[in-house]
Amino acid sequence: MSNFLGKRISRWREHALISEFSGMFGDMGTLVPLLVSLSKSNQINLTASLFFGGFFNIFTGLYFDVPICVQPMKSISALAISNNLSIGEVTAAGFFVSAVVFVLGATRLIRVVTRLVPHAVIRGIQMGAGIVLVSKGVATIYQSNQWGFANWAWMDNFVIALLTYLFIAAYYLARRTPSALILFGIGLIFGLVRLYVAKPANAADLGVGPQFMAPFVPTFNYRSLVVAGLGQLPLTCLNSVIAVSILADDLYPLLAHPVASTSDIAVSVGVMNMLSAWFGSIPYCHGAGGLAAQHRFGARTGLAVVSLGALKVLVALLLGNSISGLLNYFPNSILGVMMCLSGVELASPARDAGLHPSGNVELGKRRWTVTVVTAATLVGFNNDGLGFLTGLVCAVVFGVVEEVEACRETTGRPFDLLRLIGGNLVLKVYNKVHGVEDAGTTLSQQVVDPAKEEDQDPGTVVKKPEVDVEAACC
């Protein structure tokens, strides 16, 4: 144990503390609005949410040693608000999703899912989620006082949003950036001023001490399992597990890959909510958006999320539920701009979606088409699962077309053509499931048309055609 902690501390010393402390606030744009909204309507217990969220932050930072965030399950949170789910139903939905993901991770079936999902579809999920996050950031900015200046309105208006954008843009290319730390500090000061100086009539003062709930059994029913849970399940598998693992490899190319395996991430998501659901905590998961945001604002090691976790636990024990009053007056203008930048960072890895490993330009165009179709469907319907299915169908269709084109060069006879296409597709799926990178010789490269073979002299060596049958998006 001491050796494990020693390695972590040694790596943390190699990075700037100011950047790590800045990066830990990069994901506030997703965390704060959902915590405040659900706690105000008594659909979660804020003390438990902060305490367990902080505990999971500390564990995640120590185990993975990269800034993998702990953030609310967005689909469940949104459905809880729109359908007025009870606290028991909210926690039951999180428990159900986590239990399924835990089984996939513990049995390593999540690795099979990862191999079968085309890379272009994952990039489309990242691009679509990034665009959605940007749109939510813009919507958050519009919740400010816009052009108002009177009666302390100047602390949360379009001018503050513009100044925040200019400040972030100035630090965007900096190797070490404290922008999120500074912005969050300014936002808290503005919030305190609005809470105590402006003193809105319905504002509640900060209290002292935690307000935990007594443990209870989550409410497992149709609304929690089907309405909220099923919608979150594909989102968690794709964006909270698979996309996080791929993005971590993209952001930290010098570390041993996988930086965070899909199995480990899936088990982590499962354990979080199966522990915290009994106390009214908001359902948590990891997320590619949070990882991108914390990395963008300077985090490079697990120190960022460990520090954030310690701060959450401290706030939960000292202030408890009363902190929602302060967070409710955090400037939307600052929060929205931070969300927009996080969305841009999340969508950025999709820039390589049009590059095929073989270097084939035509295959690269098809791969890019799959990415755009996935992202467009996700954004248009605001549904990760539908975006995934649409992109997957597009990828499969392109893959079948590739096989048809390749096999036609080998044989023109209909029966042989169908047999070769089916055999090649089965062979590729088999190799994907078993993690074989190079499928080797496909059936279309092994079979020679008997009619052509009869025309050859007995001693003539038949040259087998070299056909590129790499699927467009696999």
Image: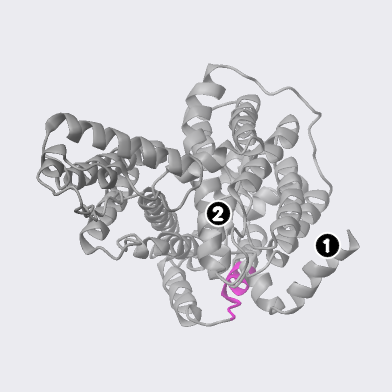
Q: Is residue 264 left or right of residue 306?
A: left
Tell which of 48 and 363 is nearer to you: 363
Tell which of 396 and 213 is nearer to you: 396
Name the residue tied to disc 1. 4
Residue at 28% across, 52% down: 372
Per the rendered image, the range of residues in magenta is 176-186
Q: Specify whether residue 181 is painted magenta.
A: yes
Quick one: label 2 or label 1, which is nearer the N terminus? 1
Q: Is residue 298 left or right of residue 59?
A: left
Q: How busy is the neighbourhood of tag 2: few (under 14 within 10 Å), some, or many (20 plus)?
A: many
Q: Specify whether residue 97 is painted magenta.
A: no
Q: Is residue 69 left or right of residue 450?
A: right
Amino acid on which the number 1 mark rests in the picture:
Phe
The alpha-carbon separation of the residues under discs 2 and 1 comes to 22 Å
Tell which of 349 and 207 is nearer to you: 349
Q: Quadrant of residue 285?
A: top right
Residue at 69% across, 48% down: 204
